């Protein structure tokens, strides 16, 4: 479980996060949603330590991450897998080398064991046999799936996904969403997905934290989201005509 | 580089020299970088050094028109200029353009495509993994390139002098073998070591802290080359002042 307590973060006097708290349970898909500039990516970066919060704490199963030393953070980070918005695959490496990279760095497994792990991860994301391709030879959806394969290669306890559906067609988006949900339930990871994709919200949002102008405005599940009367949330979730029509049918 | 940047540069270097996570992977990366910096630049350095040596011989011969000055002096001047200044400095400036811009764009692109963030999240010391192999390859391969450059520059002078008739081969060889002070080689290698460090660390710094997109990466690359060249010239003066 990951718990955030009263997170504040500002950049050059501009307060981006204003005291955000929340609990993200393991084995369920936790979503952080909000409009552009609401602070969701900043919150995610504060949680993984890419940004240092001005105040507040991030607890990984009770371990406070924010005051940790560099060496202590490394130990926690070995338990983290992350899927980036642009996949962030290493251009100079093949798919196989990308997935094997954390294994090479942090395990003493033999090459055979590592290759078996790579094959397993690729099979898990339905990309078996694509080992020798370079990232430039993959489609957007395939890159995301390789990103997921790399993220799960070390059996992470915590899985972070930053806008996993951005730039993907609706069908591929659903495939990625379902993959994230399956992995979360199968490996009991604490999964946090930052998104503003409404299909993801309605499809996999077991727990949703809605941010608006740097504040937590609402939290609940995808089943509850249609029945809230919070104006800001309704304006965000049901902005499109299609979603409005869908809401009326709920 | 203002003081804030200089402070960040020092802090980055501190991170670069942290203990590697896995030595084997770093060694592999160092070998790759040595190949790129050393072997990859050999042709360019060879061509430049040979021509500079040849041109130097012609220009020295053109300037020394007095009958009271023996022509052997052309070889001596060419040798000392090549060893002390031309080979280390010109090679370093050329390498700053070739290697410096490549390092800055490579690391800068990795920054804007979140590859550096990915390394950090995995628990890898990104400055160490990305920059340390480049610095080690710089401080080892640039001195080697400079040694080759010295040899080729002096050889170029021989060829230039012989072909143009500015100096006879015998006079040139007598010139380069007379009053040779081996200490000049030490000075040149100290310079090459310092320049190798600058050529790799300054562009790495510029690339590592890029914010934005493709435009900012290209701007960082240009800035890296300019700052590296100025730093090379400034350090050239300091090292010369200290050692000679």
Image (cartoon, rainbow, N blue to C red):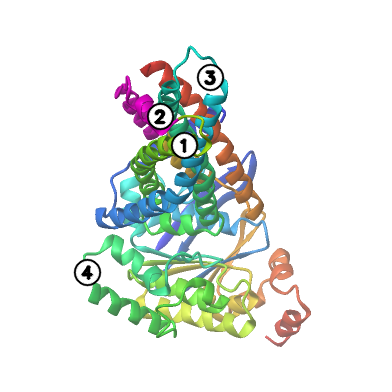
Of badges 2 and 4, the one in the foreground is 2
Q: Are marks 2 and 4 in contact (CB under 8 Å)?
A: no
Distance (Cα) linking label 2 and label 4: 62 Å
Query: What crowding class fits label 1: few (fewer than 14 Cα within 10 Å), some (14-19), or many (20 or more)?
Result: some
Question: Which image quadrant: the N terminus of chain A?
Answer: bottom left
Nearer to us in this view, A28 or A99: A99
Q: Earlier in the sequence, mark 3 or mark 1?
A: 3
Dot 2 and dot 4 within a common chain: no
Distance between mark 1 and mark 4 Cα atoms:
62 Å
The reply, left or right, for residue B217 in relation to residue A66 is right
| Nearest the eye: A211 or B46 | B46
Do labels 2 and 3 touch, CB within 8 Å? no
Which residue is at 63% across, 69% downward? A196
The picture quadrant where one finds residue A169 is bottom right
Q: CA distance from mark 1 to mark 2?
A: 9 Å
Foreground pick, B52 / B121: B52
């Amino acid at each position: 479980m990951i718990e955030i307590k009263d997170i504040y973060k500002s950049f050059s006097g501009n307060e981006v996060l204003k005291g955000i708290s929340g609990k993200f349970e393991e084995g369920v898909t936790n979503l952080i949603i909000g409009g552009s500039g609401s602070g969701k990516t900043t919150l995610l970066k504060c949680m993984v330590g890419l940004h240092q919060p001005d105040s507040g704490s991030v607890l990984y199963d009770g371990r406070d991450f924010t005051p940790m030393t560099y060496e202590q953070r490394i130990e926690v980070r070995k338990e983290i897998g992350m899927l980036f918005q642009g996949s962030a695959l290493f251009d100079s490496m093949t798919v196989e080398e990308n997935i094997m990279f954390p294994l090479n760095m942090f395990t003493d497994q033999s090459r055979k064991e590592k290759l078996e792990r790579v094959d397993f991860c690729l099979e898990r994301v339905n990309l078996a046999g694509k080992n020798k391709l370079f990232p430039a030879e993959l489609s957007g959806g395939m890159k995301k799936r390789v990103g997921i394969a790399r993220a799960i290669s070390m059996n992470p306890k915590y899985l972070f996904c930053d806008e996993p559906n951005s730039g993907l067609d609706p069908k591929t988006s659903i495939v990625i969403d379902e993959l994230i949900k399956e992995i979360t339930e199968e490996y009991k990871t604490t999964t946090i997905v930052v998104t503003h994709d409404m299909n993801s919200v309605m499809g996999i949002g077991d727990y949703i934290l809605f941010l608006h102008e740097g504040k937590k405005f609402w939290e609940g599940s995808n089943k509850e989201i249609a029945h809230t009367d919070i104006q800001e949330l309704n304006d965000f979730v049901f902005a499109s005509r299609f979603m409005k029509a869908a809401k009326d049918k709920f | 580089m203002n003081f804030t940047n200089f402070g960040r540069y020092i802090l980055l270097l501190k991170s670069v020299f942290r203990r590697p996570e896995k030595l084997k992977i770093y060694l592999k990366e160092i070998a790759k970088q040595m190949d790129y910096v050393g072997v990859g630049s050999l042709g360019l350095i060879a061509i430049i050094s040979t021509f500079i040596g040849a041109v130097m011989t012609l220009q020295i011969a053109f300037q020394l028109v007095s009958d009271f000055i023996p022509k052997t002096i052309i070889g001596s001047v060419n040798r000392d200029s090549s060893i002390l200044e031309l080979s280390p400095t010109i090679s370093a400036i050329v390498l700053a353009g070739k290697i410096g811009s490549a390092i800055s764009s490579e690391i800068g692109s990795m920054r804007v495509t979140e590859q550096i963030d990915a390394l950090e999240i995995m628990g890898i010391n990104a400055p160490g993994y990305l920059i340390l192999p480049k610095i080690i390859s710089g401080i080892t391969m640039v001195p080697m390139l400079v040694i080759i450059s010295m040899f080729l520059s002096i050889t170029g002078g021989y060829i230039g002098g012989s072909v143009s008739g500015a100096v006879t081969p015998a006079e040139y060889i007598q010139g380069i073998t007379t009053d040779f002070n081996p200490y000049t080689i030490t000075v040149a290698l100290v310079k090459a070591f310092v320049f190798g460090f600058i050529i790799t660390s300054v562009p790495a710094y510029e690339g590592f802290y890029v914010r934005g997109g493709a435009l900012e990466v290209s701007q960082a690359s240009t800035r890296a080359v300019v700052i590296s060249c100025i730093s090379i010239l400034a350090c050239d003066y300091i090292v010369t002042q200290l050692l000679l």
